[in-house]
Image (cartoon, rainbow, N blue to C red):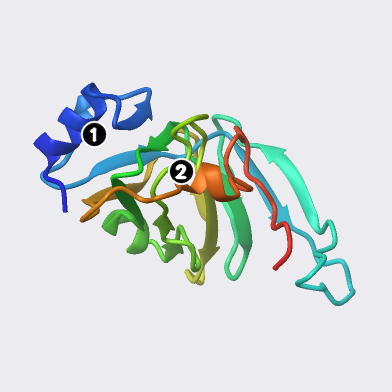
Amino acid sequence: MLSGRQIKECIMNREIIIDPFEEKFLGPDSIDIRLGNQIMIAKNIADIIDSGNPANFWETKEITDKGFILNPNQFILGTIYEKIGIGKNFSCQIEGRSSVGRMGIMVHVTAGIIHAGWGITNPSRITLEMYSVNPNPVILRPGIKIAQLTFVRLDEEAEKGYDEMSGKYTGHDNPHPPKGL
């Protein structure tokens, strides 16, 4: 796992892209990332969703400075503020920050790995799969430190990076709904 100093060196060498990069968000072995200003709310469409061809059950909303109220048991897709790119020598893990977790907010339901080569040719915003287990509503505001990234150096460079293999979830500035299994 990379130390904070190594993360900064990789950013300076453009092996890892975090744009904008603010050194104040760098920790001893991670970097904090912020919540963007657009979300997609999962709507109840009163129908079965086919995982092979998911229906459009999303409503897109902008988060204003007043914030968005995430209700108990509500699922949304969010996005981060920063654009990210990862070289083929690295893999990245996204995790919620403890202060966010202690409010009962999960920032990724299952997709915690950002693969080698993700967004390196076209830095992109990561989509967050957010869910509240808090019995009370929680206000989310754009710009809050929502999650953190940790990086590991691979034993060898990936033969093909994520962007070269599919890249189906890169190249987006806004949250992106599922494309089917």
From the viewer's perspective, is 79 left or right of 107?
Answer: right
From the viewer's perspective, is 38 left or right of 50?
Answer: left
In the image, residue 76 sits, relative to residue 19, either above or below, namely below
In the image, residue 98 sits, relative to residue 165, either above or below, namely below
Q: Which of 84 and 70 is in front in this view?
A: 84
Residue under the point 64% across and 48% down: 168
Q: Nearer the viewer, residue 96 or 68?
A: 96
Q: Nearer the viewer, residue 86 or 111?
A: 86
Res. 119 in view: yes
Q: Where is residue 24 in the image (x, y as percent from the top left)?
A: 20, 28
Identified by mark 2, the residue type is: Trp
Q: Position of residue 32 (x, y in %)?
A: 29, 41
Identified by mark 1, the residue type is: Phe
Judging by the rendered image, the residue that carries numbered circle 2 is 118
Q: In which quarter of the image is the N terminus?
A: bottom left
Quarter-of-image position of residue 6: top left
Mark 2 or 1: the one toward you: 2
Res. 137 in view: no
In the image, residue 66 sits, relative to residue 177, either above or below, namely above
Q: Where is residue 4 in the image (x, y as percent from the top left)?
A: 13, 39
Q: Position of residue 143 (x, y in %)?
A: 43, 33
Q: How far apart are marks 2 and 1 (CA)?
A: 21 Å
Q: Which of 82 and 75 is in front in this view?
A: 82
Q: In which quarter of the image is the C terminus?
A: bottom right
Judging by the rendered image, the residue that carries numbered circle 1 is 25
Q: Provide the secondary structure element on which disc 2 rests.
A: loop
